[in-house]
Image: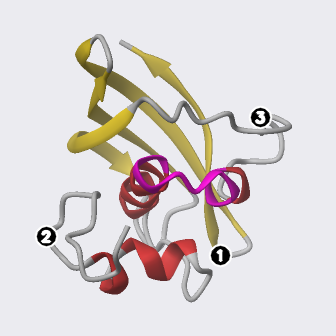
Amino acid sequence: MSTAERCPCGLGEPYAECCARLHSGERRAATAEELVRSRFSAFAVGDADYLLATWHPSTRPAEVDLDPELRWVRLEVLDRTGGGPFDTEGTVRFRAHYRAPGGTGVLTEHSRFTKEGGAWSYVDGEHE
């Protein structure tokens, strides 16, 4: 993805000024919602390393196998609890839209996050 293109997270900023800064390690997500958005963007741009790095060690898989035929196209944040800059836990409910060879689809998830050492990480989520 070109750094001048609009970021996949849905905030409307250029990728270079938005989630690319988190993906490169230049800065960390300040909130659980920002982590959701940056993780969605990581799926969209194929950044498995970022996904693993932001996954809580207690639930992190050994590897992330990204399907090259799946294209993540839009994110909707539906609800959140906690997860702010001064919280240590939070949840975010979101809807992620994708395109696949067989058509389009939607993944709705209620995810849990925790912040340790100043860094938010994805713990787990329930699909709806």
Measured from the top left, where is residue 70 in percent x and y? 41, 30
Above or below, comparing residue 9 to residue 86 in the picture: above
Q: In the rendered image, which quarter contains the N terminus?
A: bottom left
Circle 1: element type = loop
- Front: mark 1 or 2: 2
Q: Amino acid at mark 3?
A: Thr
Residue drawn where x is 64% and y is 70% of the image: 119
Q: Which numbered disc covers residue 59?
A: 3
Measured Cα–Cα span from mark 3 to mark 2 = 31 Å
- Few, some or many residues within 10 Å of mark 3 (<14, 14–19, 20+): few
Disc with the residue nearer the chain's start (1 vs 2): 2
Q: Which residues are magenta?
A: 43-51
Quadrant housing the C terminus: top left
With 10 as the anchor, is 55 left or right in this view?
Answer: right
Residue 37 percent across, percent down from the top left: 36, 56
The answer to which image quadrant residue 66 occupies is top right
Residue tagged by mark 2?
12
Q: Position of residue 62 (x, y in %)?
A: 86, 37
